Image (cartoon, rainbow, N blue to C red):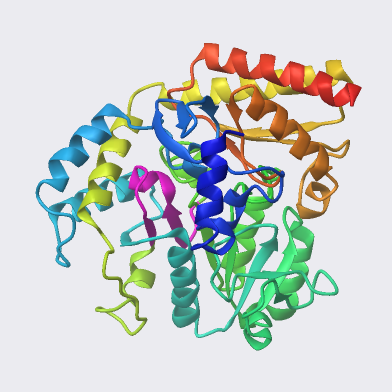
């Protein structure tokens, strides 16, 4: 790690908790000192010590077009000259809303907020207000932001209420949240059979990406849709990560399932802070000013964010773009599997579209329990060796790697070659 990054981190710790504004950036899960970034271009980032890296973090998913995409930068330059915020409606809000609604048939109406956390906590409030029920169901290892109702983990058994996953979350509030294993439809069915008339919503990442990438088993999402309809429960897809990532229509388009409510973020802001929630007209019309479910935000629909989102979605309509991302994702995942096998390293590589995670375990990774069998210390060693080779992966085992349209075949080949050397070094160690 360069001296300048170390110096800046020591300075940051004087003013920011842990020296960072989001915990995973601290490198505590992998050891060492975090990189301080000076700039990004295409699929590369450059740190303050002058080192270049192929970037698979992509700002944790939003930068599907890579860093500083020319169309986005040009539009933002023009927009900032007109002002940064008005606190009043703009045409761009409607334009971006129309693009999103046209892409996702489950959405009749949408409202912009400023983060995925805000979108998820509001979707839960809407579900409770619409159904007049208090309890919700989430899945172990699925992250929906740090709202109190959602920051819980499993209790003493699969069908018990959750307990707080953070200090400051009231236990009484956490007890309104059931937490079940991801991909276990039988337990969902049992729970809804026993308590369905008390449950407002089931919220799920259609492809889990916050315990590493874990795809839904065949029939899991379809089963959730059927069960929630049967019990009058709203199904919420948290597509903050998968929205416009797996396909132009998100995971719901990819798998052909329409939820009642959808949470969005990341890509729809083109690299600027954003969130959104949307769904059926009869549900969204319960939100103020039309209804009695309150939500507001000073910077919601910010004109700079709307501009970046519009330009990003326009580029994403390019024919063949998603097919190219999928192919490069498959190529990288296959290369990592092959090199781990050659080195005698037990590893599983889960990949869906342009998202993937390498788990250091012999078990198939299908839920939080199996994800936790991964050897996190070994991932930390792998991360450090890849970073030394100029490959920037997520500084945590339980995160996704993301590809952008700017990652080319030579970048994939360079990454696989770095992985070959890194796996061999781990095997010798």
On screen, 348 above or below 283? Answer: above
**Percent of width and height locating residue 247:** 46, 36
The N terminus: image quadrant: top right
Image quadrant in which the C terminus is located? top right
Q: Measured along the vertical axis of the image, is residue 230 above or below residue 273?
A: below
Magenta span of residues: 258-277
Q: Residue furthest bottom?
A: 172
Determine the image quadrant of residue 205: bottom right
Q: Where 1 sits versus 24, above or below?
A: above
In the image, taking residue 270 as reference, residue 98 lies left or right, namely left
Residue drawn where x is 46% and y is 30% of the image: 45
Q: Residue 238, can we see it?
A: no
Residue 307 in view here: yes
Q: Is residue 144 above or below residue 384?
A: below
Q: Is residue 376 left or right of residue 30?
A: right
Residue for point 55% across, 84% down: 133
Residue drawn at x 81%, y 42% is: 377
In this view, the residue in front, 94 or 43, is 43
Name the spot of residue 254 as percent of width and height, x first: 52, 39
> Which sits in the foreground, 241 or 45?
45
Q: Is residue 223 left or right of residue 160?
A: left
Asked whether residue 136 is drawn in magenta, I would say: no
Indicate the position of residue 389 as horizontal and vertical percent values.
64, 21
């Amino acid at each position: 790690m360069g001296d300048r990054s170390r110096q800046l981190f020591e300075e940051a710790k004087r003013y920011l908790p842990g020296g960072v504004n989001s915990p995973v950036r601290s490198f505590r899960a992998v050891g060492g000192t975090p990189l301080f970034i000076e700039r990004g271009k295409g699929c590369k980032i450059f740190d303050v010590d002058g080192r270049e890296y192929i970037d698979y973090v992509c700002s944790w998913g939003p930068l599907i077009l890579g860093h500083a995409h020319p169309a986005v930068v040009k539009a933002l330059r023009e927009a900032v000259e007109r002002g940064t915020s008005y606190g009043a409606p703009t045409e761009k809000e409607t334009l971006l809303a129309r693009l999103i609604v046209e892409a996702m048939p489950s959405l009749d109406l949408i409202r912009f907020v400023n983060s995925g956390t805000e979108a998820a906590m509001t979707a839960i409030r809407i579900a409770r207000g619409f159904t007049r029920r208090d309890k919700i169901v989430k899945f172990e290892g699925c992250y929906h932001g740090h709202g109190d109702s959602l920051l819980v983990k499993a209790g003493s058994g699969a069908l018990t209420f959750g307990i707080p996953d953070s200090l400051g979350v009231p236990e009484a509030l956490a007890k309104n949240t059931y937490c079940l294993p991801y991909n276990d439809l039988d337990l969902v069915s049992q729970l809804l059979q026993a308590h369905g008339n008390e449950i407002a919503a089931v919220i799920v990442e259609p492809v889990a990406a916050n315990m590493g990438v874990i795809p839904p088993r065949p029939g899991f999402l379809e089963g959730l849709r059927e069960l929630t309809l049967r019990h009058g429960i709203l199904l919420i897809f948290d597509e903050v990560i998968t929205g416009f990532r797996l396909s132009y229509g998100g995971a719901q388009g990819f798998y052909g399932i329409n939820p009642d409510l959808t949470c969005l973020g990341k890509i729809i802001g083109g690299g600027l802070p954003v969130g959104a929630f949307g769904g059926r007209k009869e549900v969204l019309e319960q939100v103020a000013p039309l209804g009695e479910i309150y939500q507001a935000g000073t910077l919601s629909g910010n004109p700079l964010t709307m501009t970046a989102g519009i330009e990003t979605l326009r580029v994403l309509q390019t024919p063949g773009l998603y097919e190219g991302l999928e192919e490069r994702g498959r190529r990288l995942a296959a290369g990592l599997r092959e090199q781990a096998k050659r080195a005698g390293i037990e590893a599983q590589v889960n990949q869906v579209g342009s998202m993937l995670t390498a788990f250091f375990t012999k078990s198939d990774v299908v839920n939080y329990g199996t994800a936790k069998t991964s050897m996190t210390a070994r991932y930390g060693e792998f991360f450090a060796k890849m970073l030394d080779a100029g490959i920037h992966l997520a500084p945590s085992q339980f995160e996704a790697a993301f590809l952008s349209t700017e990652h080319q075949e030579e970048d994939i080949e360079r990454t696989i070659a770095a992985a070959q050397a890194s796996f061999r070094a781990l095997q010798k160690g």
